[in-house]
Image (cartoon, helix red, strand yellow):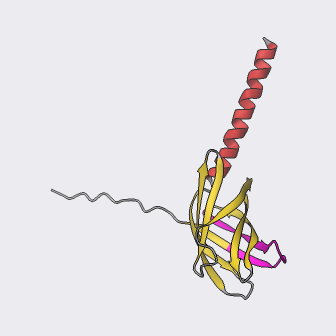
Amino acid sequence: MKRQITTLSLLISFMVTGLGMAQQKDQFVGHWKGYVILNNGAEDSLNVVITLKEGQLAGEMSDQYGLMDKAPMQNLKVTGNTFTCFVKVADTSGSIKIQLEAELDGNILEGDWHSAVNGSGDQWLLERVMKKKKRNKQHDA
């Protein structure tokens, strides 16, 4: 009997932990828009979509200059409110791998990016795009 209770307690603990991790990931799912500061100081607008597929985060990123056009985000990880990933960005030599890290604060993701090649980088910020609710129009009789 003690063994069954211990096994059941362990199973419940794993389920609660798994649920907590899924909820952490859910916070990052959605459509995000924002900007990144480039090495030359220019601001580039970003469009990001993050989804949850089979318990794993997936995403794609586009920008206004065409350095990324629905570029797949790789190795997306969540630890608490910290989000990290990699994305390949076009450059004169082909493409470079960029590491992104950000903290979630409500509907804002803000952090830094760094080139895996030379370590250069700056900041980036995304804001969750909220879905507009349909308004029901009621007419007075």
Residue 122 position, x and y percent, is 76, 78
The residue drawn where x is 81% and y is 79% is 120
Q: Write down the region rendered in magenta.
A: 107-124
The residue drawn where x is 62% and y is 44% is 54
Residue 106 position, x and y percent, is 63, 61
The answer to which of 132 and 98 lies nearer the viewer is: 98
The residue drawn where x is 73% and y is 55% is 77
The answer to which of 66 and 76 lies nearer the viewer is: 66
Q: Is residue 117 magenta?
A: yes
- Residue found at the very far front of the displayed protein: 94
Please tell me how many numbered marks the rendered image carries: 0
| Residue 82 sits above or below residue 98 on the image | above
| Residue 38 sits above or below residue 56 on the image | below
Residue 95 position, x and y percent, is 72, 75
Q: Quadrant of the N terminus?
A: top right
Q: Main secondary structure of the magenta part?
A: strand
| Residue 17 sits above or below residue 53 on the image | above
Q: On the image, which quarter does residue 67 sit in?
A: bottom right
- Please say whether residue 81 is visible from this viewpoint: no
